[in-house]
Image (spheres, grey):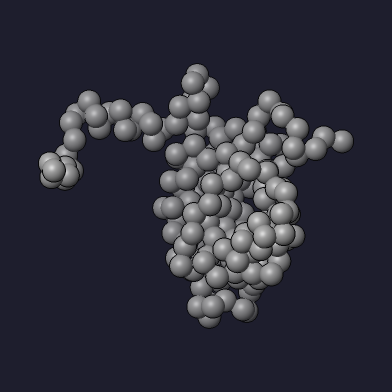
Amino acid sequence: MTSIYTNPVFEPEITAFYCIYCGYMAADTAGALHLRYPANVKFVRMPCSGKTDIRYLLEAFEQGADGVYVVACPIGNCHHVRGNERGLARLKRAKKILDEIGLGGERLDMFFMSGSQAHTFSSAVQTMTERIRQLGPNPLKVKNGNRTAGQDQKEEEEEVGFRGRRPKPV
């Protein structure tokens, strides 16, 4: 049996969106309890999982994430009443889009937990890491140099010239 802490050929990059209430507290509790979980996850805090936007989820994949998940308050116990239910509905729509474009909706998931469920938080990270290892790298990544579509777009913008606001010289 392979441990999640071995050095496999493919280590997935995962982005996790979590609410500042239950999701953040579960992550903080896991840290306080010194629970071990893979360190391949980038965390993005949101005021509520109800603020989950399909664009955020798809952008994470475009920028090179191999998998994305959302951590929300338990159903029926959201600090913003039904925010987690709204977030779940948006996540389901994003999964359909991922299936339609050939990326695969199984690369996206949502976990519900309270702030005291540190072991559940650790388990969610491990679950996503193992799932994405089985699925392989994000097909949007270019094989040579691990470049993403977002990097190509940035280079195109640099060739054309910067069109936004520039900071004032000091």
Say which residue appears at 19% left-offset and 29% top-offset. 160
The image quarter in which residue 27 lies: bottom right
Q: Answer with left or right where residue 133 lies relative to residue 13.
A: right
Figure quadrant of the C terminus: top left
Q: Which quadrant of the figure contains the N terminus?
A: top right
Residue 93: x and y, percent? 51, 58
Residue 131 placement, left or right of 77: right
Q: Residue at x 45, y 39 (%)?
A: 63
User: Vertically, is 28 above or below 55?
Assistant: below
> Where is residue 101 drawn, in percent x and y?
50, 41
Relative placement, left or right, of 168 versus 76 is left
Check the image and report above or below for 15 versus 87.
above
Q: Is residue 33 visible?
A: yes
- Which one is nearer the viewer's eye here, 1 or 131? 1
Residues 35 and 17: in front is: 35
Find residue 60 and report its horizontal and vertical position in percent.
47, 45
The percent coordinates of residue 44 (x first, y second) are 49, 54
Quarter of the figure with residue 54 = bottom left
- Residue at 56% x, 35% y: name it: 138
Q: Residue at x 49, y 21 (%)?
A: 145
